Image: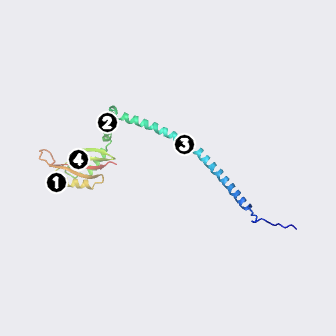
Amino acid sequence: MKLRLNLSTTPLENKRPFAAATAALGAVGVLTFLLLAHAAYTSWRANRVLRGEISHWQSEIRENKQKQAALEAYFQTPGAHEVLDRAAFLNSLIGQRSFPWTKIFMDLEQTLPPGVRVIKISPKLENGRAIVELTVGAESDEGKIKFLQALEKSKVFSDIRVKDDHNLELPGSPDRMTVDLTAWYATI
């Protein structure tokens, strides 16, 4: 029989568990390092494509800003201002021609009481609505009041403002008074 005796002053320590744990942790560390290195490389390659696209779009933005600056400089020239003013004038003429005259006369016909007539009408279009300036002649105060009340009750006329009220003494004219007023007219 063999007997194992340790004659040293300190007993022999078993370092195998420490070495095994250290080796396992080292292997996990190396594996983690390899995974992170792969993720960093993949991210760098993907970002390289994105950086190329960003560079492309930035150069396109620069080109468009240069074009915009050139157009702004062109539109500041006197010739361009003249063309823009002419276009605005022509658009206003087209807007006046597209005013629904038939509809406004039909709406006014419903609001006009007997003894009241429209002398002058002048519309200005703004955002689908029109500001209408009216001059109305009336035979009496009662007709004038009935007209203003009917205009206020109308669904197409709003914000009625009387500008002026005149009494007339014209021979041969059925109107004893005129009223100048403005009102919003809904054309739609």
User: How many residues crowd mark 3 within 10 Å: few (<14), some (14–19), many (20+)?
Assistant: few
Q: Earlier in the sequence, mark 3 or mark 2?
A: 3
Please tell me whether mark 4 sits on a helix, a strand or a loop. strand
36 to 74, vertically: above or below = below
Disc 3 target residue: 51
User: How many residues crowd mark 2 within 10 Å: few (<14), some (14–19), many (20+)?
Assistant: few
Q: In the rendered structure, which amino acid carries the disc numbered 1? A: Asp
Instruction: Give me the residue at 57% from left, 45% from top.
Output: 47
Q: CA distance from mark 2 to mark 1?
A: 45 Å
Q: Earlier in the sequence, mark 1 or mark 3?
A: 3
Quadrant position of residue 124: top left
Q: In the rendered structure, which amino acid carries the disc numbered 2? A: Asp
Q: Nearer the viewer, mark 2 or mark 1?
A: 2
Instruction: Give me the residue at 46% from left, 38% from top.
Output: 62
Q: In the rendered structure, which amino acid carries the disc numbered 4? A: Leu
Q: Earlier in the sequence, mark 3 or mark 4?
A: 3
Instruction: Give me the residue at 50% from left, 40% from top.
Output: 57
Percent coordinates x, y for residue 158 in the rendering: 28, 53
Image quarter hosting the N terminus:
bottom right
Q: CA distance from mark 4 to mark 2?
A: 28 Å
Disc 1 target residue: 141
Disc 4 target residue: 134
**Front one among 182 and 137:** 182
Disc 2 target residue: 85
Please tell me whether mark 3 sits on a helix, a strand or a loop. helix
Q: Nearer the viewer, mark 1 or mark 3?
A: 3
**Front one among 76 and 178:** 76
User: How many residues crowd mark 1 within 10 Å: few (<14), some (14–19), many (20+)?
Assistant: few
Q: CA distance from mark 3 to mark 4?
A: 66 Å
Percent coordinates x, y for residue 85 in the rendering: 31, 36
